[in-house]
Image (cartoon, rainbow, N blue to C red):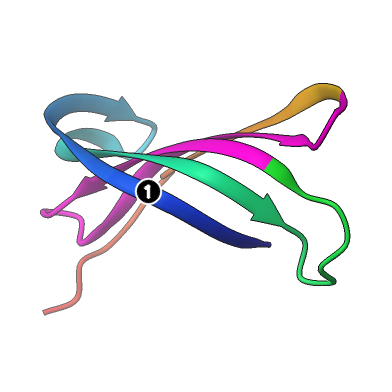
Amino acid sequence: MLRRAQCEVEGVEAIKTMAGSFSAIKIRMTGVWSPQSGAGGGPMEETLWYAPTAKRVVREEFQGRLAGKGAPATTAMELVRYAVKP
């Protein structure tokens, strides 16, 4: 999937995942998405929570829609476990 988006840092938020609790930077993205094939796509909104202590995104929520078609596709991903390497 390819994305073209405006990104905004909305602040720091406490977030709980299956991997634990984190102080995470909340980033909101709005724009358009398209499959790598280039066919289709449409508007999208995505929110990421990046936790500096985990050195990764710990939660992601995506909502995208095919231009002019049906209900939006919604996905959410959450960190289940992790190990930070020195």
Residue at 15% x, 25% y: name it: 14
Q: Count of labels shown?
A: 1
**Of 17 and 65, which appears nearest the observer?**
65
Label 1 Cα neighbours within 10 Å, binned few <14 / some 14-19 / many ≥20: few
Q: Which residues are magenta?
A: 43-69
**Of 9 and 51, which appears nearest the observer?**
9
The three-letter amino acid code for the residue at tag 1 is Gln
Q: In the rendered image, which quarter is residue 68 located in?
A: top right
Q: Position of residue 28 (x, y in %)?
A: 34, 37
Judge whether residue 49 is colored magenta: yes
Judge whether residue 26 is colored magenta: no
Give SS at disc 1.
Answer: strand
**Of 24 and 71, which appears nearest the observer?**
71
Q: In the rendered image, which quarter is residue 36 located in?
A: bottom right
Residue at 11% x, 79% y: name it: 86
Looking at the image, residue 8 lies above or below residue 71: below
Residue labelled with disc 1 = 6
For the stretch drawn in magenta, the main secondary structure is strand
